[in-house]
Amino acid sequence: MKQKLLLATLKTPPRRSKTWRSVRWLMKGMPVHVLAILLYCLGTQRLHSQESVNPSSSVKSYPEKVPFDINAEPLRIAFISYANPQQVVRDTETVVDYLRPFVGAPIQSTVTLDYGSSIESMRGGKTDLAFVDPLAFMMAHEQIGAEPLLLEIYSYGKAAYHSSIWVHKDSGIERLEDLKGKTIAFADQVDMSGHLLPREIFVQKGLLPGNRFDGEFFQQVYFAGGDEQAIRSVLNRFVTAAGVSQYALLLLRPEERDKVKVIATSIESPSHLLMARKGFDSEIKQRVKRALLALNPSTPNDKVVLSKLYGVQGFAETKLSDFAEVARVAARYGFVKDPQRFANREND
């Protein structure tokens, strides 16, 4: 009987089966790992936050504050739940308080457990802005015309990330080719950093086909349900390799981190981002954009707001063509239908 990874979720949504949801998993009697507790211990920051390095940041001007109109149409923002939903709700209150003087209208915030809910809410005109990952944005752009507004800047100063192939340090695995006939764990099939990007590493090497999910290179491919589950399956020797985000290492305890290593990295992807509903009021959109761009991690008050925005170090402007390369990857597997629309700079 083939070995299987068994995932048990706590109110697990159909889409966001990554490390930002509260999940647990069982495998051959291994202990239960509750991701929400781990993330809370890491300071309720999102996986890609690192406190050791701060990007250089120039002084930026805040938009002009405007009188508050209680009768104005509310601005509706969807936040993704990365840990305890109640904690995220409390965090959004700080963000709303910061934005309200620049918007001049009521702000309604909602916390969703998965990206699909954010897309559907935006499709129904119930959400104006939403925080999503690159794959969810590209799907939303094709389906409902969503626009990229701002990219998150991570603590090493870039609005981008990559995925890695992780193995145990004493596994004897040094090259991708050494994984032939071995086992690998990804996070989720519908996942940019936890499947498509790491899989593309093997595609570019000619080790896996570039147009379908199956292949004969590995003995077995597992989808563990999240970055932590996947990288822990390497640590605990249930699988030989894991293909997940570069930040998966942060989900291991400090004393565990030197037991795994990276043997290959993927292309870079634009970071997680804030997207806007097609046809959303351009004036308010620009006010929100300027207010978020003005946040400076070296300013105490701004640092507090950023800590509630997934612990990022700021925001950067973006355009559709920034997603051209990852759109081609997503198109291989049918998640993006027309990658050329992202490559066409006339659409920016």
Image (cartoon, rainbow, N blue to C red):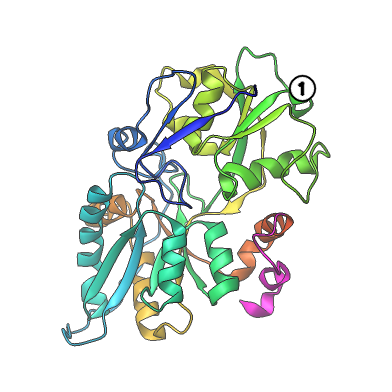
Q: Nearer the viewer, residue 234 or 326?
A: 234
Q: Which residue is mark 1?
A: 178
Q: Which residues are magenta?
A: 333-348
Q: Is residue 199 left or right of residue 48?
A: right
The residue shown at (71%, 69%) is 338
Q: Position of residue 45 (x, y in %)?
A: 34, 43
Residue 120 sits in which quadrant? Answer: bottom left
Q: Is residue 184 above or below residue 333?
A: above
Q: Position of residue 206 (x, y in %)?
A: 84, 39
Extreme residue in the front direction: 1
Residue 222 sits in which quadrant? Answer: top right
Q: Position of residue 346 (x, y in %)?
A: 67, 80
Residue 308: within the magenta?
A: no
Q: Is residue 1 above or below residue 326?
A: above
Residue 347: within the magenta?
A: yes
Q: Is residue 252 left or right of residue 61?
A: right
Q: Quadrant of the N terminus?
A: top right
The residue under label 1 is which amino acid type? Asp
The residue shown at (52%, 28%) is 231
- Near mark 1 (Cα within 10 A), the count class, few <14, some 14-19 or many ≥20, is few
Residue 22 sits in which quadrant? Answer: top left
The residue shown at (39%, 85%) is 281
Q: Quadrant of the C terminus?
A: bottom right
